Image (cartoon, coloured by chain):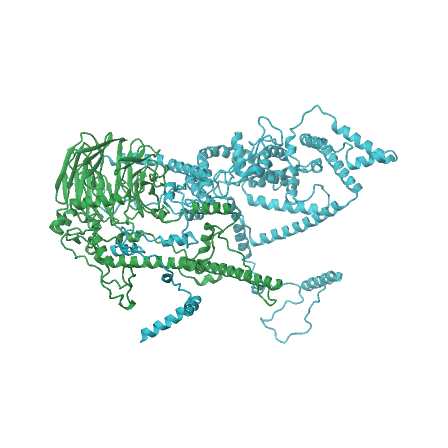
Chain colours: A green, B cyan
Amino acid sequence: MGEMETAPKPGRDVPPKKDKLQTKRKKPRRYWEEETVPTTDGASPGPPCNKKNRELRPQRPKNAHILKKSRISKQPQVPKKPQEWKNPESQRSLSGAGLGSSPLPRSKAKTRSRLEVAEAEEEETSIKAARSELLLAEEPGFLEGEDGEDTAKICQADIVEAVDIASAAKHFDLNLRQFGPYRLNYSRTGRHLAFGGRRGHVAALDWVTKKLMCEINVMEAVRDIRFLHSEALLAVAQNRWLHIYDNQGIELHCIRRCDRVTRLEFLPFHFLLATASETGFLTYLDVSVGKIVAALNVRAGRLDVMSQNPYNAVIHLGHSNGTVSLWSPAMKEPLAKILCHRGGVRAVAVDSTGTYMATSGLDHQLKIFDLRGTYQPLSTRTLPHGAGHLAFSQRGLLVAGMGDVVNIWAGQGKASPPSLEQPYLTHRLSGPVHGLQFCPFEDVLGVGHSGGVTSMLVPGAGEPNFDGLESNPYRSRKQRQEWEVKALLEKVPAELICLDPRALAEVDVISLEQGKKERIERLGYDPEAKAPFQPKPKQKGRSSTASLVKRKRKVMDEEHRDKVRQSLQQQQQQQQQKEAKAKSTGARPSALDRFVR
Amino acid sequence: GDNDGEREHQKLLEAISSLDGKNRRKLAERSEASLKVSEFNVSSEGSGEKLVLADLLEPVKTSSSLATVKKQLNRVKSKKTVELPLNKEEIERARTPLEQEIFNLLHKNKQPVADPLLTPVEKASLQAMSLEEAKMRRAELQRARALQSYYEAKARREKKIKSKKYHKVVKKGKAKKALKEFEQLRKVNPAAALEELEKIEKARMMERMSLKHQNSGKWAKSKAIMAKYDLEARQAMQEQLAKNKELTQKLQVASESEEEEGGTEEKVEELLVPDVVNEVQMNADGPNPWMLRSCTSDTKEAATQEDPEQLPEPEAHEVSESEGEDRPVAEEEILLREFEERRSLRKRSELSQDAEPAGSQETKDSSSQEVLSELRVLSQKLKENDQSRKQKASSEGTIPQVQREEPATEEEEPLLLQRPERVQTLEELEELGKEECFQNKELSRPVLEGQQSERTPNNRPDAPKKKKKEQMIDLQNLLTTQSPSVKSLAVPTIEELEDEEERNQRQMIKEAFAGDDVIRDFLKEKREAVEASKPKDVDLTLPGWGEWGGVGLKPSAKKRRRFLIKAPEGPPRKDKNLPNVIINEKRNIHTAAHQVRVLPYPFTHHWQFERTIQTPIGSTWNTQRAFQKLTTPKVVTKPGHIINPIKAEDVGYRSSSRSDLSVIQRNPKRITTRHKKQLKKSSVD
C-alpha cells in the first residue's frame, strides 16, 4: 500500500513572518521636514509614511491559519517578454523610418535610465516574490506506489483508510437515485458545493461541514448549475430559462433572454456569466449590473460543450464538426478555431495556467493541445469508449469521465501537461458520469452521476496554499462582503478579453504609426528625422569647401562603417545560431561528416 | 609468323596515318635487350596494343573443355526471364469534353492522372542509364550540339545575306519543293495529300490576310516610280498584281476556321512549307492549352497515317528545334536523323511497355517497319501528353493497340472512382501546399493498390521508399492522419456496457462518415477566411473608355493591368503553418481603445516603453511590500503644511554678486569633481 498524505490540514500553520531583511534605503527628504544633516538622515525617527501605510494595510483575517498574501503561483504566468534589446533592427521596421533609429547603446541617457529603473524594479519584485515563497508552508499531497506498484490500482477505500480523520471525512457519497444524473459546481473558495439533478433537484451545501444551505426542486429539468462570484448566488440553467437563486433557495431572477441554456460558465474577474444555449447562442451576462454584454451567434448548431480558459477568460466551445472555437465578448467571430477531432467534440477542458487544453471527441480520442500559439496536439490517446467529461485540477491533474468510470492522469510537475501513459487514479461509480469538477484548494474531486454525487480523494489535486485575500475558504461573512466590494472595484471590463491578456501592456503600434504619418503630413516634414550633418565653420582657412566636403565625407563614412559593422555582427550571430541548431540536432558528428559539403 | 605479320601491318598503318602531320607520334621501339626482365616493368611498347592485366592472368592456353560450359552459362545469363503479366502502361481515356479539358490541364502541370505507382521523377530515376550508356549518350549529345551550332551558324550567315535575289531564289526553291512533294504525296497517299492541301490553303489565307501583295510596300512604290522607264520593274509590278489577284480571289469552299492560324504565332513563310513537324513542336510547348487540343488531333491523325517517308521527320525536328524551316539535304541533317533514330531505338527498348509487343513482331522486318513501330510509340506518347481525344481505331490499328483496348476499359472504373479524391487533392494542394498533396495521395492509394500490385509485381520494391518519404512529411500534418495510439489502457477500467459490439459498430460508421467531411469543410472554411482577410485589389478600369463598348465586351488585359491598383501584401498570417487552426486576424478595437497610442516623452521606440510597463504593479501580482514600493508617489504632500514657491537658489542658481560661485556655476563639471574630492576627504577623515 502506498504512502499518502493529503493537503491542507487546517490547524498547522506557520505564523506569517514579516520580512525584516529589507535593506535600509536612503529616505527621501520631505518638504515638511526640517532640513537635516545628511549624516543623521539614517538615524532620523521612524518615517511617518511607514506608520500611515501600516494603518492602511487591509485587515488581516482573524483566522489563525491564513497565510500572508502570496501570489507566487501567478508569477510564472506573467510571460517575460523576450529580450528585445538584441535586435533593435527588427523593431525599426515596425516603428517607421522617421523614428530615431538608434539602437539601445546610443539611446538617450534618460531613456536608458528609465529602462534600467524598470529592470531593477522587476528584479526586486521578483526577488521579493521569491522570498515570500517561504510563507507557503503547505505542501501538496501525493500518492506513491510501493516500488513499482501501480497507483491506479489503489482504490478509494485504501486511501480513506490511510489518511487522517479530517481528510477521510472528505470522501463521501450522496445516494440520490431519484432525481437523475447530477451536475455539480464548487464555489471559488472550494467551501461550498451546489448540485442539480436532471429532474429538478437543486441543493447547495457547505460540503466540509455537511451543512445544507438549501434544497429545492425547481420542477423543471436542470441542465447546469453554477455559483456566481460568491456562494450566496446560484445560477441554474433550467429547461426554458436561466434562473438565479440565493443560498436560501429563493428565486431572485429569471433571465428570459437566456433561454434553453445547456451550459454555464462564470468568469470571476469580469463578473460575467457565459451561457451556451441550444439555439446556438453564446450569451454573456454581466451579473454585477444585470446586463447582457454580448449575445454571439456561434452558427454551429446546438452548443453543449463549453469551458473557460482561466488564464485569459476566453470561452472554448466544442462543436459537432470536430472543431473547438475560442470566443470573447469583444468579437463577433471566434478568436480562433481549432480542428481537433474527426468526429464531434464531446468535452473540452483548459488547465489553470491556460497552457493546455484537453479535448475528447466522438472518435474516442483524448488529445492535449498546446494553447501557446501553436494549437498543436501534444499527446493523443485512444480511449476504449471515449471521454464524455473532462476537467483539470488546480495543479494540472486531468480527469476524464468515461461511462461510469473516472480516470485521472497526472503530469510530472505543476506546469507540465498530464502524461496519458499511465492513469494516476481510477474509480468506478454507481452510474454514468454527468458532471466533474475538482474542488479548489482541496484534494477532492466531485463527480455527479446518475446515482447521486460522489466526493473522492485525489491526493495532489488542489493547490495547498490559498490566497487569504482572494479566495479564502475560511472567511467570515464580513470578510466575504469586503472581498465582494473589492472584487467589484477591480472588475475587468468585458471587452478586454482577448487571447493574449498581455496585449494591454503593449503599445497600439498601428495607431502610433498612423498618428506619426498624419503628423508628418501636417507639418510637412518629419520632426524626428535625423538632421544631416553640417560641419561647423572653422577659421584660418580650414573652412574651405574641400575640407568641409572632406569632413562631411568622414562622418558619412563613419556612419556607413557602423552600419556595415552591425550587419556583420548580425550575420555572425545568425551563423552562430545556425551552428548551434545544427549541433543540437545532430547527435554526434560522424567521422564521415567531414566529406559532406 | 602470323603475329609478326599483323604487327608489321599495324606499323604500316600507323606510319601512313601519321603522314598527314597532325598526329605524328614517334614510336618507341626497344632496340636492345633490357637488363632486367621482370614482372615489374613489363612494357607493351611497340606492339601498339594496350596491355591488359586480364591477359597476363590468363593461362597461356585456354582449356577447351570448359569453353562449352561457359557458353552455356553465358547463354543462360543473357536470357531474361519472361515476366508475366507484361507491363502495360495505363491509358487514361477521357470521353466527355470536360474530362478532356481536365486531363489536358493536368498534363500541362505534369500531374499524375491515374495515380501511377511511379511519379515522373521516379520514372526518370528508374530509367537512369549505366555508365557506358551515359557516355555514349553524352557523346551523341555533344555531337548533336556541335552540329546544331554549325547549323545555327550557317542559318545565321544565310540570314545575314542581303541579296534579295538570293532570298527570292531560296523561297522559290522551297515553294517548288513543297509543291513537288505534294504531287508525290498525292500519288502515294491521297488522304495525306488532302491534309497537305489544307495546309497550303491555310498558308494562302494567311498570305491573303497579310496584305502583302497590294502594291503598297516600299519596294512596290519604288517600282511604280520606275515602271514608266524600266521594263523589268513593270514586269515585277505586273507579277505582283497578278499574285494579288490570285490571292484575293474568293473561294467557295470554306475551309477550317481561321482563328487557329491567328493563335499560333508562326511566320507566314514557315507555314508556306507544308510541314507536320511544326505542329508537333507547337503541341509540345504551345502557349494556349485550349487551342492545343484541336491542333493535336490533326497531327495525330496525320501521324497515324502510314507513310514511311513523311513520318520520321518529327523525331528529327524534335532535336533541332531552334533551326529554321528549310530542309537541306546536307549531311548534317542526315547525321542528325541517324542520331535521332538511334536514340528512339534505345528509347523503345527502354520503354518496353508498348513497344515490346510491336518490336518483337517487327524486328525481323525491314527498316521501314522499324520506323513505323517507332512512330507508333511516338504517337502514343503524344496521345498521353495531350490526353485529348478518344483514340480512333485507325486503319492500321494493329494487334498491340487492340490488346490495349481491353485493359483500358478495365481501368476506367477505378479512374472514375478516383475522381472525387483527386478533387480533394487539388483542393488540399491549394491549401496545404505540396506536401499535404502527397499525404492525400497515400490515402487514396490503398483503393488502387490491389489492382496495381496485380498489374505490376516488379514495381513493388519502390513502394517502401515512397512510403518513407511520405512519413517524413507526415510530421507536419496532424489531423488527416491520426497518430495511432495504443488502443487499450493498462488499467482494469474498461467497463462493460450492454451491447458493446453494436455500439462499436455504430461508432465506427459514424467515424467513417465524419472523417473526410470534417477536414474538407474545415479547409474550405479556412480558405474562405484567408481570402476574406486578404487585402483587396482596386480595379479602376472603365470599360468602354478608349475602345469599343457594348454588351459582352471586356476591357483588354493590358488596360486592366494598367488600372489595377494592387493592394500591398499584408503580414503573413499567424496560422500560415498551422493547417488545423484558423486564427482571427481582425483587430480588437475594444482592446485597442485601452492601449497606449502615443509614446511618452523620453522613449523613441515602443518596445522601450513596453519594457517599462511590463511588470505589473497591482497588488494582485505582487507581494504587499513590493506593491507599496512600486506605487509610492514621487511627491508626498502633507495636509496643512505650507509649500513655499520655488526660488532660484533651490534649483542651483545663485545671485551674480558672488563672482567665484558664478564661475563655478559656469563649469558644473569641475565643481562636482571637486565636491566629490571633498566628500571623499571628509569621509576618510
Q: In the orientation shown, which residue stands out farthest toward the front?
A: B657
Image coordinates of residue A220 in percent, x first then y, are 20, 30
Q: Which image quarter: residue A586? A: bottom left
For residue B214, side relative to residue A196 (left or right): right
As displayed, is residue B581 above or below residue B198? Answer: below
For residue B240, side relative to residue B577 (left or right): right
Image coordinates of residue B208 in percent, x first then y, are 72, 31
Is residue B361 visible in the rendered image? The answer is no
Q: How many marks?
A: 0
Q: Which residue occupies the foreground of this view, A261 or B286?
A: A261
Image coordinates of residue B458 in percent, x first then y, are 47, 45
Q: Which residue occupies the foreground of this view, A378 or A306?
A: A306
Q: Which residue occupies the foreground of this view, A171 or B205?
A: A171
As displayed, is residue B492 above or below residue A37? Answer: above
Image coordinates of residue A196 in percent, x first then y, are 19, 36
Is residue B14 visible in the rendered image? The answer is yes
* Quadrant holding the N terminus of chain B: bottom right
* Quadrant holding the C terminus of chain B: bottom left
Q: In the orientation shown, which residue stands out farthest toward the right?
A: B229
As displayed, is residue B97 above or below residue B446? Answer: above
Q: In the orientation shown, which residue stands out farthest toward the top?
A: B252
Q: Which residue occupies the foreground of this view, B66 or B537?
A: B537
Residue at x-position 21% and y-position 59%? A18
For residue B441, side relative to residue B17 (left or right): left
